[in-house]
Image: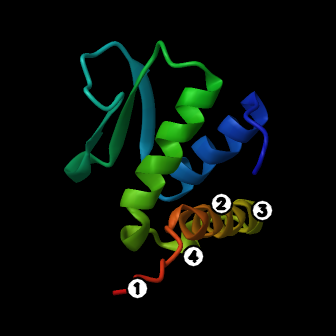
């Protein structure tokens, strides 16, 4: 996994900027801690989240809009970081899968 630092947060925010999304931190009563306005490509995140919370929410949003991301708009550095995020995310999903169990009758 990567470190939850302000630098990591800035890299993720840069990815959002390059794919055409605006990230805003505001007060709100978001049940999930964020709101995505699809037609305006705006992600509004609870401003009271700490750095780790902001990173986790942005990663969650990235995973939901993944199909609509145009990688050609990203710089090489951002694309490399984005691919690293996807790789780590895929590994985490594999680890979450329960082991198949043998059922004997």
Q: Who's the residue at 43% across and 40% down the image?
A: 22
Q: Which residue is mark 4?
A: 72
Q: Are marks 3 and 1 in contact (CB under 8 Å)?
A: no
The mark nearer the N terminus, 3 or 2, is: 3
User: Could you say where residue 39 lies in the image, as x and y percent from the top left?
Assistant: 20, 52
The mark nearer the N terminus, 3 or 1, is: 3
Toward the bottom, the furthest residue is 105
As drawn, 104 above or below 77: below
The mark nearer the N terminus, 2 or 4, is: 4
Q: Which residue is mark 2?
A: 85
Which element carries disc 3, helix, strand or loop? Answer: helix
User: Could you say where residue 67 lies in the image, as x and y percent from the top left?
Assistant: 38, 73
User: Could you say where residue 101 lies in the image, as x and y percent from the top left?
Assistant: 48, 77
Quadrant (top left/top right/bottom left/bottom right) for the C terminus: bottom left
The mark nearer the N terminus, 1 or 4, is: 4
Q: Which residue is mark 3?
A: 77
User: Is residue 20 at least partly visible in the picture?
Assistant: no
As drawn, 95 above or below 100: above
Q: Along the horizontal axis of the image, is 7 left or right of 99?
A: right
How packed is label 1: few (under 14 Cα within 10 Å), some, or many (20 or more)?
A: few
Give the alpha-carbon distance from disc 3 to disc 1, as whole Å.
52 Å
User: Could you say where residue 103 lies in the image, as x and y percent from the top left?
Assistant: 40, 82
Q: Which residue is mark 1?
A: 104
User: Is residue 76 at least partly visible in the picture?
Assistant: yes
């Amino acid at each position: 996994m990567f470190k939850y630092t302000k630098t990591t947060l800035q890299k993720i925010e840069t990815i959002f900027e390059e794919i055409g999304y605006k990230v805003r931190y505001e007060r709100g009563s978001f049940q999930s801690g964020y709101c995505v306005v699809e037609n305006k490509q705006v992600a509004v995140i609870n401003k009271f989240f700490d750095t780790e919370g902001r990173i986790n929410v942005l990663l969650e949003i990235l995973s939901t809009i993944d199909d609509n991301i145009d990688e050609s708009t990203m710089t090489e550095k951002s694309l490399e970081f984005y691919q690293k995020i996807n790789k780590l995310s895929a590994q985490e999903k594999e680890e979450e899968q329960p082991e198949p169990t043998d059922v004997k009758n």
